[in-house]
Amino acid sequence: MTKDPAGWAYNLLVLLHIICAVAGFGAVVYRGFLLEVARRRGAAGAAEAGVLAVYGQVSQFAEILIYGVVVFGLAALGEEGHSSNFGKAWVVAALVVYFVMVGLLHGMVRPAERDYRRTMLALAQAPPVKPPARPPELDRLDGLYRRISAGTGLFNVLLLGALYLMVFKP
């Protein structure tokens, strides 16, 4: 006997899945914009480094919510009562995309963000350099920014793919 997919437990799990997706992925997408705004300000003071530290804490919370996406999504599939759901092509593809996204966050974006914050703080504490000289930290920040941007851009494209799979279930 299969369970009614519209039961309260199923609906609650889907709701939690969606809340985690909106809050977690939304924060990750939004943090790319925050980094761009901080970068365009051009300041490299301790206050900017502090803002980036808070940005890192928000990012960590968002990543916890992203783990909830897969937990609640799989639980909702299990609550439906059809074990064949786990073998459907769209479910398998969505899981692969999800794990690639998480791997991208942990392997590329987060390490570059940590280095960016450390370099920003080092630049804030460094003695001023007279023009036309350029502090070496700025070159490091530019490289880290490009890495974060590439990783975040790829993450966003993968997110669109995951959304396609969730909505259309090909």
Image: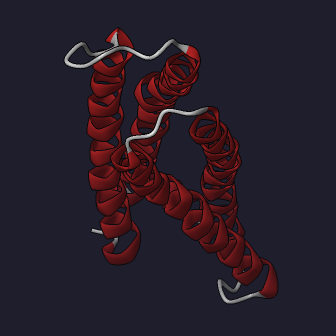
At a point 60% along the width and 52% down the height, the residue shown is 66
Left or right side of 21 for 64: right
From this view, report whether residue 156 is shown above or below residue 118.
below
User: Residue 117's quadrant in the figure?
Assistant: top right
At a point 67% along the width and 38% down the height, the residue shown is 50
Q: Residue furthest right?
A: 9
The image position of residue 9, as x and y in percent, is 80, 78
**Who is closer to the viewer here, 167 or 160?**
160
From this view, report whether residue 139 is shown above or below residue 155.
above
At a point 44% along the width and 17% down the height, the residue shown is 128
Left or right side of 29 for 149: left
Left or right side of 137 for 25: right
Is residue 2 in view from this perspective?
A: no
At a point 75% along the width and 87% down the height, the residue shown is 7
Image quarter (top left, top right, bottom left or bottom right) of the C terminus: bottom left
The image position of residue 95, as x and y in percent, is 45, 47
Image quarter (top left, top right, bottom left or bottom right) of the N terminus: bottom right
State the count of labels: 0
User: Residue 45's quadrant in the figure?
Assistant: top right
